[in-house]
Amino acid sequence: MKGFTSTLWPIRYKPLPDELLSSWLVRLAHGHGLKVQTFCNLIFGNRLQVWNRDVDRLGPDWLVNELSARTGTPLEIAYGTTLRAYEGLLYPQFKLSGVLQWILTLKMYHRKHEGFGLQYCPQCLREGPEPYFRKSWRVAFNTVCVKHQCMLRDRCPNCGAGVAFHRRDMGHGDLAVTDSLAECHRCGFDLVESISESIISYDQQASDWHAGLCRQLTGARFGKSEFDLDTLGVMRQLAMLLTSQYPTVTLHEHVSDQLGVLTVKMTDGRIATETRSLHERHHLIQLVAWLMVELDTRLRIAWRAKAVRYNHLGKDFESAPKWYAEILKGFSNWRC
């Protein structure tokens, strides 16, 4: 294509605020009037495959560097579109495979998203000149939009498909589908038209604590945030305990009872928080937030009620912070 051999591309869209790498890449392809796959093959060739893995998580240098050079975007901003930008903020160290702490999984299979790892806020999609997808929507504890005070969504309300806007071109021959990124790839429903649901809250203090955590995501870029890895690690440990399969761990039922809410049936099996649906995660995060507001006191009550044992509280938690270990010390002697 004429113009692609020059240093800068004819269309040089810059990433929008908090935009995901995949969203930026698809907008660039459509801006040039090309199908996403055609665009990627033209630029990167057949050897370097973009869509057969989680491109937002991997953020490969060859891809990010090319987009940066061809659009005149500073490298720091270009890399800020990837989930690798959360290294040291949401998770301690990046890894290529396996579950990454607090990063939602897409369950990739032959370029398909079999999971529901990309969320969205219908009202956010309506704003601005065009819809685009945010990096913060890939964060597992981020289940609400604090700006519009509504729940996020993790699938098409019309057909139930997960969000996979890069597949909008499929089934259209050689024609590029340059319509909104917000249209469902399976049924064509415009996600902008999804009904916004009010935030589900069990306890105001816990909801405020959770909202504060979600609000920090707007500044989470290359170390510019107030996130505390120790706190996030303890939160994840509590979420694991709340979904424990051990018959002697009834923390889920205990906390639900304390809050006066029905116990939500979780998907069976040893499933990471980052793989669960929005409905399950939001429920878990509210229980976790309620515990975190007064962790020492509320964990002690749960321990005395035999909802959780001392040995389970620290099980498989090798990176437990000192302050959490100090809390557990008080539970070490069952004779107390």
Image (cartoon, helix red, strand yellow):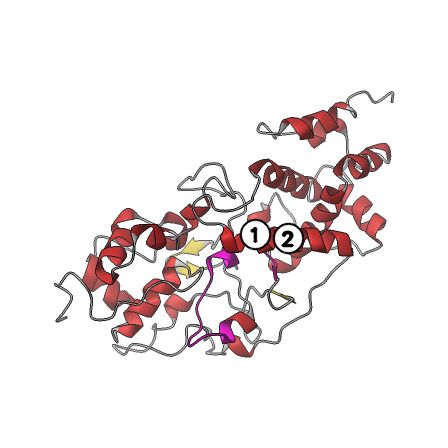
Image position, residue 289 (x, y; %)? 70, 48
Please report the residue visible at 59 percent of the width from the left and 54 percent of the height from the top: 214
Question: Was residue 128 drawn as part of the magenta stretch in this picture?
Answer: yes
**Quick one: SS at disc 1?**
helix
Q: In this image, 48 relative to 299: left or right?
A: left
Does residue 115 appear in the picture of this structure? no
Q: Which residue is mark 1?
A: 216
2 and 1 marks in contact (CB < 8 Å)? yes
Please report the residue visible at 49 percent of the width from the left and 78 percent of the height from the top: 190
Question: Was residue 28 drawn as part of the magenta stretch in this picture?
Answer: no
Image position, residue 220 (x, y; %)? 49, 50
Q: On screen, 260 above or below 161?
A: above
Q: Amino acid at mark 1?
A: Gln
Please report the residue visible at 58 percent of the width from the left and 45 percent of the height from the top: 272
Front-most of residues 219 and 308? 219
Please report the residue visible at 50 percent of the width from the left and 42 percent of the height from the top: 89
**Quick one: SS at disc 2?**
helix
Q: On screen, 172 above or below 166?
A: below
Q: Which residues are magenta?
A: 125-145
Q: Which residue is mark 2?
A: 212
Q: Quadrant of residue 14?
A: bottom left
Magenta stretch, main secondary structure, is: loop
Q: In this image, 116 relative to 195: left or right?
A: left
Q: Amino acid at mark 2?
A: Gly
